[in-house]
Structures are given as structure tokens and as C-alpha cells.
Image (cartoon, rainbow, N blue to C red):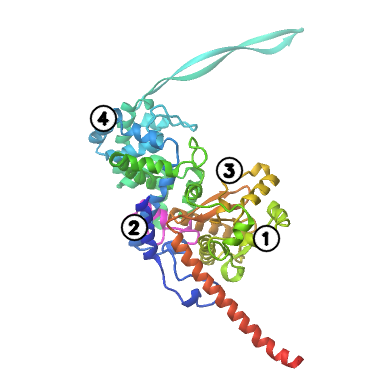
């Protein structure tokens, strides 16, 4: 994890782009931070090889949570590196020429090294072959058909029932080599080697293993037609980071479709991270076990952790219990959110049970606060969403300030909310840390909502933030900074705060210039 933070901080250092003083663009229309992350949102267009390399490294590192949050992370590493499977992996790699560590990583991701693993969608075994693919690669899946006989009423003649005997075929598998590691692993190695020869690259072979050969052909065909991708070697990272809602849109829509299906466009990145994790397990088992403890569910270790933020805020963050505690930290650990939608691209908005509850609060203004990093995240998301929406050029759409539906809460208030909405009880009240916020997209134009979702995803893939989407409620829940990115977002807040004071000063001077003659006239 420490290496991840160093990479992210190094990348943030490389990514700052100098703009006009005080964070204003040439039009003075809205806040433009001087510190920006390169290659995010519209920055994907024309991305240099150096930035692509950094984004790829961050994307690979960001997969740590997706892998290590599963309760099978440690048992899976123990199985994969055990002597019995190691002998099979070594033999399969030597025979096929496909790298052993990559083969192990795929087996780890597919089944956690469990030879009897079965997916609800059909694939089975340690390498999770479908029945069709298994037969293609030479594995035997032999079925036997038995028959059940049932007696069914056909009709009645003169009051007497007439029956017919029906024979119902029942198919069952009597031999399935997918469940035999000594058969399935060598078959997978040969299949991956064939895919690598077919597509000319190992990254596309890995991609095809999960997404299918048709998916690879689709993506590479779109990439050849895409701006900036066709003349260079087409790699998985170039395709993944080479599009956005406003750039190479056909490619973006194809990736979006497959992401909704099974996240297959991120599979190669997960495999690369798994290679690193298995190597870590071999060389420093204690460190690996520490990662398992770090990323496990903070409440129930037998379940997968639900969100990165739960992990990041599980320890080391205080929970604000009462209004008095919020008062004591105003202006230091917690700061008030900016209230200038035109400049900063968001507005503070309350609805539903929270608005009802706030009428009974001692000081509702306290709930318009959050940590400087959280306000920085909100400000930066609004900025990236607005400029991507402008580049997208959605016909008939005007940018609508993002609706912030929740900032900091107290534990007392959280209990009050839980009482009003018992079906939405918070198991782990991270809103009470002041490090997160909620953003509604119910009232956003379709194009802007698309941009918002993309920007939040993009920053998440960079390891800069975490969030939980809630499509039913129509909002992004619990959006907040990663520990490594807090210094960057705190700089965004400080810059925006300076900008906000400058705007207020300009406004005050304008009011004074206008009001002074009137005041003199009245005198």
C-alpha cells in the first residue's frame, strides 16, 4: 500500500498544470484550479505515453481493493502457492510457453485456486471454463442422459380418465475435466498461448480469456478507427484510457457496455495486480496478511468489504458524536462548503427525511461543513464534470450545478435518520467523519449525468477517491478522498477558498461603488 501512495503522490506532482492566477480561466466564468490531475476527463484526449504509463500503474494499483477485500484472498494465495498446484503450474508453463506467474494470477482471480468452484452462470473449475470453451481446448465434459417417466392425464372418456406415460430426458455430467486441475490448468495455458499468437500480444490474450475473443475483435476494430490510437501499437491500456464521453465515443460506449456486464475491460489490470500480490505473498507473507486485514470488511470479516471508503475510514478517523463537537472543530478540521453554484459548479441541497429532521436541529448550518479534503474532492469533481460536459457539447443541455444532498453528520443525527428511515440503517457511519458527501443526479440532464459518472469513475480508477453509486436513490453516496490523495484535494480546497474570498471581495467592492452615490443622494 505504501508503494501505491508513493506512486499516486508522485503522479499528482507530475500532473499539476499551471493556469491563470487565482484559478480563473480566460472567461472568468467559473473556478479552474491551477492544480490538476493529468489524463482525467477531457485530459484523456492527446494523452502522452508518459501520462499513460502513470495512469496504467495507478489503475493496476487501484485494483488492490477489488482483490483483497474478498474473504478468500488469503486462502486463495495459500492454495495457489501450495506444492500440489505449483507442480501443475510449472509443468503447464513449460509446455505452453505461457508465463507461470500470469497463469497463477488468472487461476487466483477466477476461482481463488478452488478446483471445485462453480459460477452461477455456468463456468466451473479452477480456471472457470464454460462447457463450450472446455470442449474447444480439449477437455472432456461427458454427459449422460437418463429418463424420468411421468403419468399425465390426457382426457376423460365417459367420465373415465385416460392417462399417457411421458418420458422426460434428464441430462447429467458423468465426467468433467474442468474440475481436475491437472487437466484444466494445462488446457488453460495452451489456450492462452494460442490467444497470444492470434492477437499478437499477451494483454489481449488475457483480455480475451475473460471478455471473449469477439470482445477483443470489437475493441481493436473500434480502436483502429479512433483518433490517436490507430497508428500506434494498440494495447489494452491505450484502448481503456483512449476515450471518454466526449472523445472516441463509439469506443467509450463499447467499454461502458462491457463494464456493466462483467467489468471485463478492467480484467487485465486486475491480473497484473494479482501477479504482484502473489509475488508479495511468496516474499513477505506478513505484509500480505496485513493487506488482508487492511482491506477486509470493517464490521464482518466473512463478507466482502462494500466500498473503498469503508476501508479507508475504518481506522484513524474520529466520529463526531454531537453538535458541540462540530462547533469545536469549525474552521479547522471541518470547513463550510462554498455557496456559489455558478463559480464552483455545485449547490447545497437537502431533501427527504434529512430536510424534515433538520428542522429540529439546534444549528443546521453545522451540517454544511466537511473536511477540507472532502470539499476539495467535491470542487474538483464539479470542475472536471463541467469541462467534460462542455467538450461533449450535448445539444440543448445547460450545465446544472451538482446537488450536494449530505455533508457531515453527527452520530446523534445519524440515529435520528435511522429512526426515520429504518430500512436504510447505516452499519458503518462514515458520514460522521466529515470526510465524505453525497451528490444527487436525479435532476441532471442525461449528458451531464453521464459526464459526472465518468469523472467519478475516472478518479476512482486513478486511486484518488472512493464512492458508492446508488441508482435506486439516484445519487453518488459517500464520495471521499483516498488517504494518499488528501494533500492534493486539500490544495484544491485552499485554492478555491482563496478564489472564493477574492470573489466576495470583488462583489463587495462592486456593491459599494453602486450604493455610494445612492446613499449620498438620499442624504
**Going 63% across and 59% down the picture, which residue do you hit?**
367
Q: Nearer the viewer, mark 1 or mark 2?
A: 1
Mark 3 = which residue? 427
Q: CA distance from mark 1 to mark 2?
A: 46 Å
Answer whether labels 2 and 3 touch (C-beta < 8 Å). Answer: no
Q: CA distance from mark 3 to mark 1?
A: 24 Å
Q: Position of residue 259 (x, y in %)?
A: 48, 47
> Viewed as shown, does residue 432 lie left or right of 230?
right
N-terminal-most mark, 4 or 1: 4
> Viewed as shown, does residue 417 lie left or right of 94?
right
Label 4 CA crowd tier, 10 Å (few <14, some 14–19, many 20+) = few
Q: Position of residue 54 (x, y in %)?
A: 35, 58
**Going 49% across and 47% down the picture, which residue do you hit?**
314
Mark 2 = which residue? 53
Q: Nearer the viewer, mark 4 or mark 3?
A: 3
N-terminal-most mark, 4 or 3: 4
Q: CA distance from mark 2 to mark 3?
A: 38 Å
Report if residue 249 lies within the magenta region: yes
**Going 44% across and 53% down the picture, which residue do you hit?**
461
**Going 32% across and 43% down the picture, which residue do you hit?**
275
Q: CA distance from mark 4 to mark 2?
A: 35 Å
N-terminal-most mark, 3 or 1: 1
Magenta-highlighted residues: 226-250
Mark 2 falls on what kind of element?
A: helix
Q: Which mark is residue 364?
A: 1
Mark 1 falls on what kind of element?
A: helix
Residue 173 visible to the viewer: yes
Label 2 CA crowd tier, 10 Å (few <14, some 14–19, many 20+) = some
Report if residue 228 lies within the magenta region: yes
Mark 4 falls on what kind of element?
A: helix
Mark 3 falls on what kind of element?
A: loop
Amino acid at each position: 500500500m505504501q508503494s501505491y501512495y508513493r506512486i499516486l503522490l508522485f503522479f499528482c506532482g507530475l500532473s499539476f498544470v499551471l493556469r491563470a492566477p487565482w484559478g480563473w480561466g480566460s472567461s472568468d466564468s467559473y473556478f479552474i484550479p491551477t492544480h490538476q490531475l493529468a489524463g482525467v476527463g477531457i485530459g484523456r484526449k492527446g494523452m502522452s505515453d508518459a501520462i499513460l504509463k502513470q495512469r496504467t500503474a495507478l489503475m493496476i494499483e487501484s485494483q488492490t481493493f477489488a482483490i483483497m477485500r474478498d474473504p478468500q484472498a488469503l486462502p486463495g494465495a495459500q492454495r495457489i502457492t501450495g506444492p500440489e498446484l505449483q507442480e501443475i503450474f510449472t509443468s503447464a508453463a513449460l509446455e505452453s510457453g505461457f508465463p507461470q506467474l500470469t497463469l497463477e494470477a488468472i487461476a487466483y482471480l477466477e476461482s481463488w485456486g478452488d478446483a471445485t468452484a462453480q459460477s452461477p452462470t455456468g463456468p466451473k473449475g479452477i480456471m472457470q471454463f464454460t462447457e463450450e470453451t472446455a470442449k474447444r481446448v480439449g477437455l472432456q465434459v461427458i454427459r449422460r442422459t437418463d429418463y424420468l417417466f411421468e403419468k399425465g392425464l390426457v382426457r376423460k372418456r365417459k367420465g373415465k380418465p385416460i392417462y399417457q406415460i411421458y418420458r422426460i430426458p434428464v441430462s447429467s455430467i458423468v465426467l468433467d475435466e474442468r474440475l481436475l486441475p491437472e487437466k484444466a490448468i494445462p488446457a488453460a495455458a495452451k489456450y492462452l498461448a494460442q490467444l497470444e499468437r492470434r492477437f499478437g500480444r499477451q494483454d489481449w490474450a488475457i483480455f480475451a480469456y475473460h471478455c471473449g475473443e469477439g470482445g477483443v475483435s470489437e475493441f481493436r476494430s473500434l480502436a483502429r478507427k479512433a483518433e490517436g490510437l490507430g497508428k500506434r501499437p494498440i494495447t489494452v491500456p491505450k484502448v481503456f484510457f483512449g476515450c471518454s464521453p466526449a472523445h472516441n465515443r463509439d469506443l467509450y460506449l463499447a467499454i461502458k457496455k462491457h463494464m456493466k456486464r462483467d467489468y471485463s475491460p478492467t480484467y487485465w489490470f486486475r491480473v497484473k495486480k494479482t501477479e504482484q500480490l502473489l509475488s508479495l505473498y511468496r516474499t513477505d507473507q506478513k505484509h500480505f496478511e496485513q493487506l488482508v486485514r487492511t482491506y477486509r470488511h470493517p464490521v464482518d470479516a466473512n463478507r466482502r468489504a462494500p466500498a473503498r471508503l469503508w476501508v479507508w475510514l475504518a481506522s484513524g478517523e474520529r466520529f463526531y458524536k454531537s453538535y458541540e463537537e462540530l462547533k469545536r472543530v469549525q474552521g479547522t478540521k471541518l470547513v463550510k462548503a462554498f455557496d456559489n453554484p455558478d463559480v464552483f459548479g455545485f449547490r447545497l441541497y437537502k431533501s427527504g427525511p434529512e430536510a424534515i429532521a433538520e428542522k429540529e436541529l439546534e444549528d443546521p448550518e453545522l451540517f454544511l461543513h466537511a473536511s477540507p479534503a472532502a470539499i476539495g474532492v467535491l470542487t474538483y469533481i464539479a470542475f472536471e464534470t463541467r469541462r467534460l460536459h462542455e467538450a461533449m457539447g450535448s445539444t440543448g443541455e445547460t450545465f446544472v450545478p451538482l446537488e450536494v444532498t449530505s455533508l457531515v453528520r453527527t452520530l446523534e443525527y445519524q440515529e435520528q435518520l435511522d429512526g426515520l428511515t429504518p430500512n436504510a440503517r447505516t452499519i458503518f457511519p462514515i458520514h460522521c467523519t466529515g470526510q465524505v458527501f453525497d451528490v444527487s443526479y436525479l435532476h441532471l440532464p442525461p449528458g451531464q449525468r453521464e459526464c459526472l459518472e465518468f469523472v467519478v469513475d475516472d478518479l476512482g480508477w486513478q486511486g484518488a477517491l472512493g464512492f458508492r453509486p446508488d441508482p435506486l436513490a439516484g445519487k453518488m453516496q459517500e464520495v471521499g478522498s483516498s488517504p494518499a490523495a488528501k494533500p492534493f484535494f486539500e490544495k484544491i480546497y485552499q485554492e478555491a477558498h482563496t478564489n472564493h474570498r477574492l470573489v466576495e471581495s470583488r462583489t463587495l467592492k462592486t456593491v459599494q461603488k453602486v450604493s455610494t452615490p445612492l446613499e449620498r443622494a438620499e442624504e
